[in-house]
Image (cartoon, grey):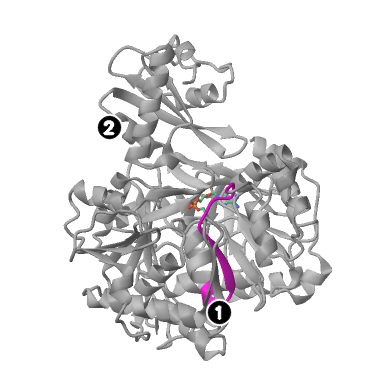
Amino acid sequence: MANIETFAQETRIFPPPAAFAKTAAISGMDAYNALCAEANSDYDGFWGRLAREQLTWHKPFTKVLDETDAPFYKWFEDGLLNVSYNCLDVHLQNGNADKVAIVFESDGGDVVKVTYQQLYEKVCRFANGLKSLGIKKGDRVVIYMPMSVEGVVAMQACARIGATHSVVFGGFSAKSLQERIIDAGAVAVITSDEQVRGGKRLPLKSIVDEALALGGCDCIKNVIVYQRTGGNVTFNPGFDLWMHELVANQAADCEPEWVSAEHPLFILYTSGSTGTPKGVQHSSAGYLLWAALTMKWTFDIKPDDVYWCTADIGWITGHTYIAYGPTAVGATQIIFEGIPTFPNAGRFWDMIQRHKATIFYTAPTAIRSLIKAADADEKIHPSQYDLTSLRLLGSVGEPINPEAWMWYHKHIGAERCPIVDTFWQTETGGHMITPLPGATPLVPGSCTLPLPGIQAAIVDETGHDLPNGQGGILVVKRPWPAMVRTIWNNPERFKSTYFPPEFGGNLYLAGDGAVRNKDTGYFTITGRIDDVLNVSGHRMGTMEIESALVANPMVAEAAVVGRPDDTTGEAICAFVVLKRSRPTGDEAKQIAKELRDWVAKEIGPIAKPKEIRFGDNLPKTRSGKIMRRLLRILAKGEEITQDISTLENPGILDQLKEAQ
Ligand code: PRX
């Protein structure tokens, strides 16, 4: 509600700068409206035209959209293509072989530039190496890598041979990795000896060893290790292979595997409302079409741009807007190994200055923490850096509050660069609701309007449209090419999660609440409507964290809720009942620490609760249902003023006020 009120009061409007609009891919609202009208009048024709224009097909498709098995929609199904061919070979044929594809900057500041020709050769050599191990079309390969050129090479090499990759973020624990390996039934893991972040070396290979030792991973035939630091690792010759040895004698060309448009390009696990993460499966052609097109529409990418997305390849943003989108359009992009605060919190601004970045895409959490850092130390304030190369800014992953938006606009964009606040999800494959920088007048805090062809709407609990100004549930009314195809191993869960029968079974349910402005129709996302938290732009399922907590032998019961946090958007707050009596004082602090470390081990450090509170019980109704509504109020530190007459044990509320 707070969000809705803030938005309703927001009157600042920033029209696109004339110079930007002049050369933009979509210039002016008339051009935007014309594309929307084209999609509305001939949906198949619209998408078919774009797929023919944007992608290079080995065999053209004859049918655009097949809805016979809805909601398992199929796009361009009888067409054949290869994603890696579309991201690499086409640029060598277009005279861009020597264009820089990747400017890689290590944590320590070393810079390596890789041209499209070099990237092509690296991908082909590695693809041949994977083939030499017997890895083939349809096999699943888990990638557990640091931010690196090799990470992108690994993803593209899988795409080249038709293997389906599943990237697991390098911050996930051995247990999370093991669960994903088993669910995907992967034949190999690609990892590195260590990763380097913020001046520290962190293990990766040893976590893979630990994951495999947990058992159930007999499907894995090899672990391929990129040597990043040369640190000590346990090596099991024959089973473990060095990446540099595997590629040493491989040919620098590799005939791509031509796959159907619907061939699974990747699986990416993400949190949902239950204890187990969902393997979101994407397609090849529809996904790539949207990755390429949104690079042009939303980022207005031009041949001379130096584009930088700060996401990690372990998340969907790193898939679409690092590994695939920028390469599909032949862009030059920066890939950064490290963290924004090392060696100091001016690192991003320093890198923009040195590499003359023109497009910068980051998360509101990063912006908010850098605002604090800049306020505290003027030496690293953005005003100390030359940021004049920038022409466009982007935001992703969580709502950007108007104050952070204004700071970004003023101090990074010098009031000259449009900001694209891009709303989308792991499941949507690419941007859904976002301003177009040469067309859409911007309003801080609003992701504005759906992209052409995206039929976003706001409905009530019965699936009926709500008028502008009324908050409700965000849905998408028609399928689009980049949408999730299924949940790996669980098509039923796919149907019930995203196309629930209560909504007629044909509306895609995003899982977010939203409201449209009365006058402009602009969308503002009001946050998740399910049990999913958004911490620093990362999705965390409350059930997943609860399951991890109750797996600890000390814990009898746990309930996890989110509370607003100035920097991370939301923070994780856990209410815990131990099997023994409720601890207090230093002992409570000690146990809270143990439980935090436990969650880090079960899921990963990103899931560590910020706060743990102990009680002899949790607030429950007479039928035993935990009243999470009350826990949310307690987590915020607010007084409970509501009616608690249905509560079985009101005395418990006082105990739960104290955080550890
Ligand atoms: O709640 C929305 C929020 O992030 C969720 C998707 O998370 P994930 O699949 O991890 O993908 C993040 C990167 C695309 C959404 O359901 N979200 C994402 N972008 C925005 C946002 N909320 C508000 N504004 C955004 N721009």
Quarter of the image that includes the N terminus? top right
Task: Indicate left or right for 215 with 112 as reference.
Answer: left
- Which region of the structure is painted magenta? 326-342
Q: Nearer the viewer, residue 497 or 465?
A: 497
* Residue depicted at 81% across the width and 71% down the height: 19
* Label annotation for residue 426: none
Q: Where is residue 262? Give x, y as percent.
A: 37, 73
Q: Residues within 10 Å of mark 2 (few under 14, many from 20)?
A: some
User: Dots 1 and 2: beta carbons under 8 Å?
Assistant: no
Q: Nearer the viewer, residue 99 or 289?
A: 99
Q: Is residue 192 a member of the stretch shown in magenta?
A: no
Q: Nearer the viewer, residue 573 or 263?
A: 573
Is there any visible trace of residue 619 in the rendered image? no
Hey, which quadrant is residue 17 in on the image? bottom right
Query: What residue does disc 2 label?
Result: 551
Query: What residue does disc 1 label?
Result: 50
Q: Amino acid at mark 2?
A: Ala
Q: Is residue 331 a member of the stretch shown in magenta?
A: yes
Nearest to N terminus: mark 1 or mark 2: 1
Q: Amino acid at mark 1?
A: Leu
Task: Indicate left or right for 501 with 112 as reference.
Answer: left
Q: Where is residue 3? Give x, y as percent.
A: 66, 39
Is there any visible trace of residue 257 in the rendered image? yes
Against 532, residue 554 (above or below) is above
Residue at the far top in the pictured view: 651
Q: CA distance from mark 1 to mark 2?
A: 49 Å
Q: Nearer the viewer, residue 14 or 462?
A: 14
Residue at the far right in the pictured view: 18
* Residue depicted at 48% across the width and 24% down the height: 631
